[in-house]
Image (spheres, grey):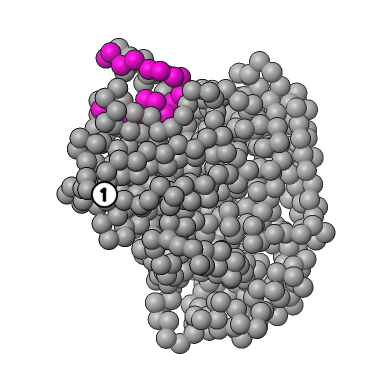
Amino acid sequence: MIPPETLDVMTDLMTHRGPDDRGTYHAPGVAFGVRRLSIVDVEGGHQPFSDASRTVWGMQNGELYNHVELRRELAADGIAFRTHCDTEIIPHLYRRDGARFPRALRGMFAVAVWDERERRAVIARDRLGIKPVYYTQVGDLLLFASELKALIASDLIQPTLDFEAIDAYLALGYFPGPRTPLAGISKLMPGTTLTVDPTGVRTERYWEYPQPAPGDPRRSAESWEDELMARLDEAVRLRLMSDVPLGAMLSGGIDSSLVVALMARQMGEPVKTFSIGFRESGEANELADARYVAQVFGTEHHELELSFADDTVDLETLAWFMDEPLADLSALGFLALSELASKHVTVALCGQGADELLGGYRKHRAAALLQRFRPVRMPLSTVGRAAGRWSPALGRLGEAFAASTPTERFLAMSGRIDAGERNRLVRPGHSVLDGAAARRAVEALAGDLDADPVAEALYVDAQLALVDDMLHYFDRASMAHSLEVRVPFLDHPLVEFCATIPTGLKVRRLTTKHLLKEAARGIVPDRIIDKQKRGFFRGAVGAWFRAQAGRAIDDYLLAPAPHYAAFLDRGEVAEMIARHRETGDADLGYLLLALLMLEVWLATYLPRFSGRATSASASFRVDASPDG
């Protein structure tokens, strides 16, 4: 078993995830450590919790929105509770349901249970992957933590790069689970339990992301709208559970505006709202729209406008909190937004997830075109590929028209690097960087999918980019400032319902999120519903690169001996930078961003552990032996 001081280092390294309390539990063969951000039962919610026999212990990172209902059920069975904290139900629920207990939970969570009698540990991640879990096996020890840095800080592992994972990252801009940048360390997949007992270590899915299953085609659009809004309203209501100040992230788009509108209906005081914009974003700066929505609903509004040209962008700090390289500049903005919100509230709701459920991206509009023009897809593919010389977007559409499988279509629309660029970029001797890793990650999800192009794109997006890009930076950026962000659109009953909505109601005549927009009329102002979607920070990549040309680009990518040069060609990277400065090509900009964030991570994140050897972190011996 790891010594107490090592467990303290692991947990204290994540004080930002839980600044209010630290709890530990040590017994032969097991060590638990947890940092707590106090939200429900602030005074009484010390973790970990045990059952009455003190043989089952539980802890969590996250929130269980149905804990009151489960508490009533358990109380009816004779369980006496000492606090009102949601975590207290976990050991009792395990005693009732065994390792299947996560199926009863509704919320966002990373949960761990230790059963002393059975010498069994069960770790579970929520269904949509809102909360993270990393784990690794070292000899007969299993280590797990909410953040990668806690595992490295244990001084029990030797960080080694996973080039298969890096290959996928170059194509996608994020590390698709279960892989991480480091070999031997995995992410626990959403909806999965990790069990350690005398028989060994195993993972098991307790929930599968719902495949598209369109409901009754005779059902009216109004009926779909009514049920969608009723389910979202319930999801928002459940997420108002808090004993500390609560607010909302307000971008000025339909998703966050709808969440704020539903909160305003249910709260007895003005909603606290928070918005951020970048001056260089031009029309994509939605501060004016957010301000308008705040006025309509009478919120207590706070906003911040930044400039990445004038203000220092600390990529080293960003890489530290992100834990993994991530080629998404939205993380910069969300980190600043979380800092702003944390000065006023401890919990904030947001509109994340609606695009992946209801078809909100340009790629979903493109998928609708694929469905409409399937009979003539090959001629259109030829035209699109030819037009790719002038328009990368049309080129990708042409490749998507030519694709024959869901995996090929996804990579055509979402891939960041083509085969020619990869061959020039990768140094000889690194054949593992062959471009196939992203394909394998997508095929693992979409290999047997039989659906229309819109449905298949939504299905894959929700399990890849949503989890390992957007929810990744939402969790890391918010928890960096001890702020809990809740995601009503990812309430799992709502997700299951959305899988039954016909795709023709999601993207209709190239109108994205058609059903949500119609359902929101009369609740959210039409000005917000009908405006063009603007991705936060996504339109400003070129301007950001121009602002950083003499700073991060030169300091990292053009350094005399960059770390990436061990496997990528520095000369080719320099040529890519020169081409981007000349053309401003957006696709090239995204690839350079991926390379930049990879180099920042290699140069600053890993070296912080040199010479040294959460919310939740712990270790278990694989054989769960009592002799320590």
Mark 1 lies on residue: 628
Q: Which of the two residues, 271 or 392, is positioned nearer the viewer here? A: 271
Instruction: Please tell me which residue is depicted at 36% across the width and 63% down the height of the picture.
Output: 184
Instruction: Please tell me which residue is depicted at 71% across the width and 75% down the height of the picture.
Output: 554
Above or below residue 18? Residue 299 is: above
Please give left or right for residue 599 compared with residue 403 in the image. Answer: right
Q: Which of the two residues, 542 or 520, is positioned nearer the viewer here? A: 542
Instruction: Please tell me which residue is depicted at 64% across the width and 26% down the height of the picture.
Output: 245
Secondary-structure class at tag 1: loop
Q: Position of residue 612 (x, y in %)?
A: 49, 63
Q: Which of the two residues, 76 or 2, is positioned nearer the viewer here? A: 2
Q: Position of residue 378 (x, y in %)?
A: 46, 67
Q: Amino acid at mark 1?
A: Gly
Q: Which residues are magenta?
A: 77-95
The local crowd at label 1, few if under 14, some if 14 to 19, many if 20 or more residues have their Cα within 10 Å, is some
Does residue 392 appear anywhere in the picture? Answer: no
Q: Position of residue 176 (x, y in %)?
A: 44, 58
Residue 609 lies in the magenta stretch: no
| Quadrant of res 327 | bottom right
